[in-house]
């Protein structure tokens, strides 16, 4: 039994499948200049037509595409946390290597939280913490915080990761640590929570809102009350304050200076200059493993790992 033969030339040339050319319509291709203004406008001057005069959607799309692209570019640039990320060059015996500044700091076990805490921020910080723990679980991780707060669940993801990894995490507040940022500041290792002298710390209860049916509103209201109780318990754990004082302090926005935050128990120390122990941790033996001239490595340059540059943040 013979199989049927399909003639592709007939299928491709079938009138039902071939694209039909659109009829020529000069209204879609050139503007209709009003007769009253045709004599007043010189022909050498370009005429910008009104898009509302044309029923073709393609004309309006072509006219508005550069405007939309420019607006999208501006919005995208404003949504980025860092408009300009510097690059640093590391000189080694094997040549030069370029890093963006945050990757270079990550090499020194320094993680930065700048700006609002969102799900994107949490995913990056969690990945960095897990990576640094896999590199060396006994060396500390330095977490620099300058944040007005953000999403509670995203902040709790970072908090749980700090408690989960074996590497001790030191926290330092630069600028501000408000709302969820203050919780991450207090979540550092005991004795390793610091703030610079002009930083500000703020704590308050969570806020939110919902819409929907009355039963759904009640469910969300109960959930945010549970979240508030959980946050109060976390603050009480790290500040060693009674839960009653935590609830009273977080009832409204409570701003604190570094000295007040130390008295409250959110931090352990107010520093103005970097201690030598932190210099050793940041630029010492845990760095990139490259050569440096004698006398640059300091006391922390053991183990055959010495740096070519000093990183100051």
Image (cartoon, grey):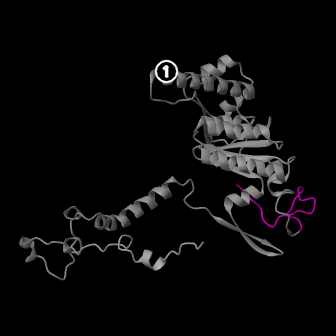
Indicate whether residue 82 is drawn in magenta.
no
- Residue 299 in the image: above or below residue 7: above
**Label 1 neighbour load within 10 Å: few <14, some 14-19, many 20+:** few
- Foreground pick, 82 / 45: 45
Which residue is at the far front? 1
Name the residue that disc number 1 marks. 215
- Residue 198 in the image: above or below residue 54: above
Which residue is at the far top? 244
Can residue 256 be seen here? The reply is yes
Indicate whether residue 304 is drawn in magenta.
yes
Is 23 situated left or right of 253 in this image? Answer: left
Residue positioned 63% across, 64% down in the render: 86
- Percent position of residue 136, x then y: 85, 51
- Foreground pick, 292 / 67: 67
Question: Where does the magenta region start and end?
Answer: 294-313
- Foreground pick, 103 / 306: 103
Residue positioned 67% across, 32% down in the render: 261
The image quadrant of residue 159 is top right
- Residue 194 in the image: above or below residue 46: above
């Amino acid at each position: 039994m013979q199989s049927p033969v399909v003639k592709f030339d007939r299928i491709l040339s079938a009138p039902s499948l071939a694209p039909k050319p659109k009829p020529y319509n000069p209204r879609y291709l050139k503007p209709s200049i009003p007769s009253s203004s045709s004599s007043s406008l010189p022909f050498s001057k370009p005429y910008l037509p009104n898009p509302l005069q044309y029923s073709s959607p393609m004309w309006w799309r072509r006219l508005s595409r550069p405007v939309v692209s420019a607006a999208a570019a501006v919005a995208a640039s404003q949504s980025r946390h860092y408009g300009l990320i510097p690059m640093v060059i590391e000189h080694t015996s094997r040549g030069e290597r370029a890093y963006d500044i945050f990757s270079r700091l990550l090499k020194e076990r320094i993680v930065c939280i700048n700006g609002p805490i969102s799900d994107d921020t949490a995913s990056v910080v969690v990945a960095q913490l897990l990576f640094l723990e896999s590199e060396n679980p006994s060396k500390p991780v330095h977490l620099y915080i300058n944040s007005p707060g953000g999403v509670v669940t995203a902040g709790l993801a970072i908090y749980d990761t700090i408690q989960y990894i074996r590497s001790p995490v030191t926290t330092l507040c630069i600028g501000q640590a408000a709302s969820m940022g203050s919780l991450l500041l207090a979540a550092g290792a005991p004795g390793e929570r610091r703030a610079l002298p002009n930083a500000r710390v703020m704590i308050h209860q969570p806020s939110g809102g919902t819409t929907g049916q009355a039963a759904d509103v009640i469910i969300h209201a109960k959930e945010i009350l549970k979240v508030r109780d959980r946050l109060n318990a976390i603050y009480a754990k790290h500040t060693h304050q009674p839960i009653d004082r935590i609830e009273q302090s977080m009832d409204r926005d409570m701003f604190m200076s570094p000295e007040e935050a130390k008295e409250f128990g959110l931090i352990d120390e107010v520093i103005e200059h970097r201690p030598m122990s932190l210099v050793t941790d940041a630029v010492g033996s845990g760095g990139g493993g490259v050569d440096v001239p004698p006398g640059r490595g300091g006391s922390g340059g053991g183990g055959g790992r010495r740096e070519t540059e000093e990183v100051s943040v």
